[in-house]
Structures are given as C-alpha cells and as structure tokens.
Amino acid sequence: MDLRDAYFVDGVRTWFGKSRQDGHYWTTRADDLVTKVMKELVRRNPKVPWDEVDDNIWGATTQVGDQGTTMGRVTVLTAGLSDKVAGFSVDRMCAGGMTCQAIGSSFIKTGCADIIIAGGVEHMAHHPMGAGADPNPRVVTEKMVEVKYFNMGNTAEKLHDWLPENGEQPVTKEEADEYSFYCLEKYFKALDEGYYAKHCVDMTVFSPTGWKVANYDEQAKRGTTLESIKNLRRFPFKAEGRVTPANASGLNDGACVSLLMSGKKCKELGIKPKMKFVGAGFVGVDPSIMGWGPVPSTEKVLKNFNMKFDDLDIIELNEAFAVQAVGFMKHFGMKTPVDPRLNPYGGTIAMGHPLASSGVRLSMQLAQDFELNPKAKYGLTTMCVGLGMGGSIIWQNVVGKKI
C-alpha cells in the first residue's frame, strides 16, 4: 500500500487565560473555547469544503463536565459544521492535541481521510489537574508510582537530581532561572512584533466584572527581571528545592485547533499548506522523571525516519518546567541558556500550558517559524506528558514549495 502525504494547512488558538476566578475564561465553557477557534479556522480558510471534513478530533485531559460530552462530536454542531462530520475525543494528557494530529495525519496517509480538524483544549479553572480522578490503588500499594509523583512539581525536582546520577549533565536552579528569563524576553519581543497576533483569536467573554475581550496571554508578566526570578519563592516540593513559579509553566485555560489535509485535496482546492507531517514518536519513561520524555521520544522518531538531530532546523518544545528544557538542550548538544533553534519566539513558561492544547500550539508556531525562516527544512514539536511519557512529531517545511 502506498502512503500519501499529510499536510498542516493552518492553525488558530485562543489567548491563554489564568485558571482562576478572575481569569479570562472563568465563566466561559471549554466547548465554547473550541467552538470559537473552529469558527475562526473556517473563516480564515474559505476554500475548504467544510462539509467534507472527515473527522473532528479533540484532546482533553479531564473529560467531564464541559469537556466530557465527546468534544469532537459536540463541537461539530456548535461550530456549525455539517452533521455528517464525525468527531471523537482523545486523552493523552498534555499530549492530547499532539496525539490528535498524529492520528489525523495517519488517517490521511493511509487514505482514510482527506480533511481533518485536530485540536486540544483544557479549562483547568473548571477542571483542576487530577480533579475527580480515582487512581487504581494497586498503582500505589504495589509501588508502580509513588504518590508524590502524581504531582508534576515533584517530578521536576526529581529530574534535577536524576540527571547527574544517570550520566547526564546537571541542571542547576540558576540555569533554570536564566532559561526562564530568556523565554520571557523572547516571548515579549515576538508579541510586540505581532508574531502571536497572526495565529491567536480575540474572544469576547463575560467576567465577574462584566464583559471584556480576551486578547492577550494572561500569564506572562512584562518587566520581569532575572534578579526577580532568582529571588522568587520556591515551591514546597522539596527542602531547598529548585522549582519556582518562574521556572515552571502555569495553570491555564485555552484551546488550539489545526487543519490537516492530504496533498491530493490541497492540489484540488488550490490550497498551499505550510508543512508536511513526517512522523510521530511516543514513548513511556519512569513517571517520577516525567520531564525526560521528550528526549527518548525525539530519539525514537529520528531513528524511525532515518534522521539525525542535526537535521532539525527549528524545535518547538513545551517547557512544563525549565529543567526539562535545559536537560533536553544539554543532552542534544544545544547551546544553553539560549539556542536559536529552540523556541525562537518564546515558550510555555511565558504564555502558559493549557495541557492538551499545547501540542497543537507548538505546531502552529513551527508553521509560522517556517514562514519566517524559509531556508529551514525540518522542524520538531515535542513535549513531556504526565505519568511518564514523551511525544515528538517531525514536520517538513513546504512554505512556498510545490507539493
């Protein structure tokens, strides 16, 4: 069987809100966030025959309440698509949206679909991490996972210790803080130059103080200095610990969506895609060092597609914690604290991490990175995943190229 090419055509995200009562989306439903980005995706792509979409695939970690009614199918209806469009939901925690893209691209490559909507959403204000979960007691009693490592902050502290104990270069708190500072610096520079306005959509929302427009990422704090980051209180995960609110991602609400299409359909419609799906790799790691996941998942996908790390021109990595980003950089021989190939326009520590949405956010940034860097050939989106996993996707730049 001959495999077909699958392409990323476009992506849209909400601005990310803080997960609290005074955050952007406290009174907004998760499925309405999805509806908003889907409608904007439709508006921006008038050539697409939206009634011919083969599947609407959505990732969400906590699938209850306004995230629990098979998001992929419900939002077909709320976004005004034809009721002939199928849909389903996926849970791979932080990599939910990324997994939707891998599934959708695989559907296209194997001839099962021509047009796929793939996205991720997380409303962590409505559904705090782990809310309503009932872990199997065997996981604890048989010591499959220590209870404390259900808390992601503890996994970050463990990773700090684990790296030098296992032949990897250590990552100090000072290095994590410095990385975080430059992440913020890059983000605000890109924001001021209009980078984020190109793929974010404003949304009118009702707040406790009345109607307002959610038109910025709430988490990022302008004017943050390296000194203020270094002096910030430490989380109580460990005595003299190294993880702080400044070198970790936040608790956020938001939705991201992408449009995937076969090469055949792109040609038929006269649509110019931005990048081609090369392949994906997902792996498991010890849950206590969850943040290490992107390293083996990247090694896996590179091996599976006969590529080397140096073949990657741009890498969009989701920094749940700075220690995992710096550890990744050191493992692959990148420059620290800043390497021009990694998160060139800022990352999660600056803008926030609404769990299942973030993998899709990485892809829309990579597509825009390709537009801004036409000589780049290959890029990577990669992230760590709760309970000890990693996910990576390789994409090829096709901006301005004949497909």
Image (spheres, helix red, strand yellow):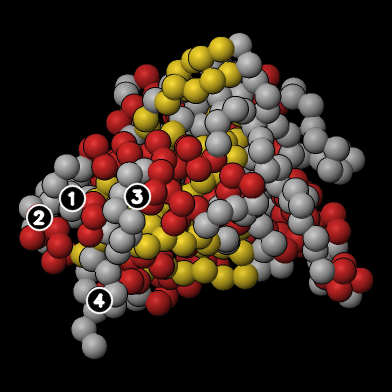
Q: Earlier in the sequence, mark 1 or mark 2?
A: 1
Name the residue beneath numbered marker 1. Answer: 48
Q: Give the percent coordinates (x, y) of residue 151.
A: 78, 50
Name the residue beneath numbered marker 3. Answer: 258
Tag 4: residue type?
Gly
Q: Residues within 10 Å of mark 3 (few under 14, many from 20)?
A: many
Q: Is residue 284 above or below residue 120?
A: below
Tag 3: residue type?
Ser
Q: Earlier in the sequence, mark 3 or mark 4?
A: 4
Q: Give the percent coordinates (x, y) of residue 308.
A: 37, 68
Q: Earlier in the sequence, mark 3 or mark 1?
A: 1
Q: Earlier in the sequence, mark 3 or mark 2?
A: 3
Name the residue beneath numbered marker 2. Answer: 269
Report whether 9 appears left or right of 226. Answer: left
Task: Residue at 15% x, 62% y: name it.
Answer: 265
Name the residue beneath numbered marker 4. Answer: 111
Q: In the rendered structure, are the residues bearing label 4 and label 2 in contact, judged by CB atoms less than 8 Å apart?
A: no
Can residue 16 be seen in the rendering of this structure?
yes
Element carrying mark 3: strand
Element carrying mark 1: loop
Q: In the rendered structure, are the residues bearing label 1 and label 2 in contact, judged by CB atoms less than 8 Å apart?
A: yes
Tag 2: residue type?
Leu
